[in-house]
Image: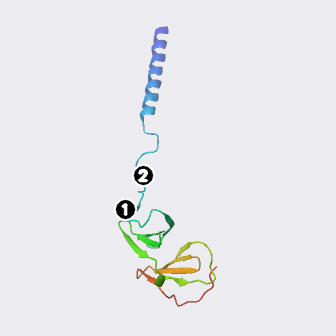
Amino acid sequence: MENITMKLSTIKVIRLLLFIVLLLNSPLHAQDHYAFTPIDCSDGLSGNRVRNIIQLRDGRIAINANEIVSIYDGTSFQYFHYNKSNIIPLNDYGGHHRIYVNEDYIYIKDWYKLMAININEERFEQHLGVTCKVT
């Protein structure tokens, strides 16, 4: 009887050791496969220093980097370069860089200036035709 009990104990120990070995060899750590892919200049992004990222209502992503707004549709970028003709003066706003989006526009405001990109026509607007107080 003692011999049978010793054999059962040995089998339990062997099973426990086998379980531990299998557990240590299984990939319990974070896998190298990610649900996202990093995007940088080599992929077409206008710069590696990103100031803002915002999702548009149609699912595209607007990325503001290096005085350029890049709109990413999942496969390629479209670029909107800042220049003096794109700037709408904001006399009452001396704050830091902000980006906003609605159905028709991406608004970028920074230190006494505003830029507006018409999302539907994919171009900068030089005049919005409205007067409002910016806070």
Kind of residue at badge 1:
Asp
Q: Is residue 104 visible?
A: no
Circles 2 and 1, Cβ within 8 Å, touching? The answer is no
Please give the name of the residue rendered at 60% of the width and 72% of the height, measured from the top-left corner: 96
Q: Which residue is mark 2?
A: 34
Q: Residue at x 63, y 85 (%)?
A: 133
Tell me the SS state at disc 2.
Answer: loop
Disc 2 to disc 1, C-alpha distance: 17 Å
Q: Nearer the viewer, residue 18 or 108?
A: 108
Q: Position of residue 125 (x, y in %)?
A: 47, 84
Judging depth in this view, the residue of 94 and 70 nearest the camera is 94
- In this rendering, would 42 be left or right of 127? left
Quadrant location of the C terminus? Answer: bottom right
Specify the farthest residue to the top: 2
Q: Which amino acid is tagged 2?
A: Tyr
Question: How packed is label 1: few (under 14 Cα within 10 Å), some, or many (20 or more)?
Answer: few
First in sequence: mark 2 or mark 1? 2
> Up-down: is 104 above or below 64?
below
Say which residue appears at 59% left-offset and 83% top-offset: 90
Nearer the observer, 107 or 67: 67
Residue 81 appears in the picture as rendered: yes
